[in-house]
Image: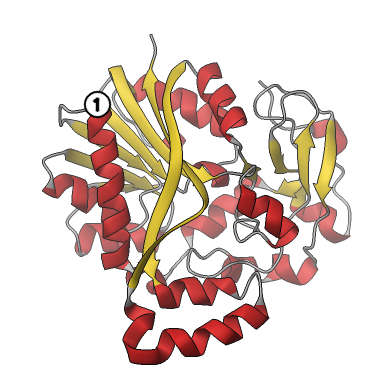
Amino acid sequence: MALYQGSGFKKEDGLNCYLEHVVCNICGSQDYEVLFRSTLNEDDFRQSLAQYSISQKSPGCGQIVRCKHCGLAYVNPREKHCDMIDNYAMVKDEEYLKESKSRDITFLRGLRFLERYCPQKGNLLDVGCFVGLFLRLARDHGWSVQGIEPSRWAVQYAKEELNLNVSQGALEDIRLEDGYFNAATMWDVIEHLPDPQSTLSLLHRKLKKDGVLLLNTFNYDSIFRKMCGRKYWFIERMHIYYFSPQTLAKMLMACNYEVLKIIPHFKTLSLGYYVARLKDVSGVLTSLMKPVSSLFGLSKRNITAYAGQMTVIARKKQ
């Protein structure tokens, strides 16, 4: 399927020189309705790297549309693929590491869920592994692990601090043996991918017969998104695909996976982290919560919460 809609893009002065038009990544349709207009301006593109951080929500977002044929929501027009890749390669995020112990709790919960469907511990590939916290945990639980990550800083940390086998780049850039991995994971990754259907198809080839894929992303149809609208905390610049359980299942089935289960995704982070992110939705609520979270060291206390995300487990079909 041709992803890029070349005829709909003209390189002109202003924002258009930063953008490209794409077709629906599931069905290839060019027919869509606009859900939210873009809030980006030229200053956002000049300072783009500062907005590519896990620990800090970017202030703007491109135009979000929904396909009239299959229902997939995505950003269109969007930043050029090459510019996004360059920005991800330069990402550094020291703040992410401050929540590593909390993140380990979430990853352990995910690993146990994975092992229910893939009890034989073998080769595991984590796509978009960042600094490698999940890989370290899986290795400690008996898996042979390998990761792929675009951020040079994160790859260096994973190699030097955690002694992990991590390659820098995208899945499409790395030579991997077909039919080698028992399991693959993508944690908060698929919403960032320029061509998720192509990546899922390639990953399908890398899995063994009956290999298992686990991924998580936010649910665009969640009650939280419907309540918050444009202020929903996962609507941000780095996210270019907005899946519902139905559209994600459609894409996985189109890539020859059997969807086994879709469940709510619970994330464990410190109360201080949640309060800091709450400012993106309500500055008033943040001003009320911040003093409370600072009392008696509560800001460091771990909180497990559902924020509108989902975890999907799927199996490779032949």
From the viewer's side, name the closer residue of 271 and 120.
271
Please report the residue visible at 18 percent of the width from the left and 28 percent of the height from the top. Answer: 119
Quarter-of-image position of residue 170: top left
Quarter-of-image position of residue 242: top right
Instruction: Single out the residue that lies furthest toward the top.
Output: 318
Q: Is residue 19 above or below residue 253?
A: below
Neighbor class of circle 1 (other Cα within 10 Å; few <14, some 14-19, many 20+) is many
Please report the residue visible at 70 percent of the width from the left and 63 percent of the height from the top. Answer: 231
Residue 57 position, x and y percent, is 58, 67
| Amino acid type for the residue under numbered disc 1 | Asn
Residue 237 position, x and y percent, is 65, 58
Asked if residue 173 shows in the view, the reply is no
Instruction: Find disc 1 in the rendering and name its residue.
Output: 182
Whether residue 84 sits left or right of residue 15 in the image: it is left
Whether residue 65 sits left or right of residue 49 in the image: it is right
Asked if residue 269 shows in the view, the reply is yes
> Which quadrant, please, contains the C terminus?
top left
Please report the residue visible at 44 percent of the width from the left and 73 percent of the height from the top. Answer: 273
Q: Is residue 207 above or below residue 60?
A: above
Quarter-of-image position of residue 229: bottom right
Instruction: Kindly state the secondary structure of the residue where label 1 is placed.
Output: strand
Residue 175 position, x and y percent, is 34, 31
Q: Is residue 102 above or below residue 292?
A: above
> Which quadrant, please, contains the N terminus?
top right
Whether residue 164 sits left or right of residue 54 in the image: it is left
Please report the residue visible at 68 percent of the width from the left and 29 percent of the height from the top. Answer: 3
From the viewer's side, name the closer residue of 50 and 143.
143
Residue 209 position, x and y percent, is 29, 14
From the viewer's side, name the closer residue of 283 and 85.
283
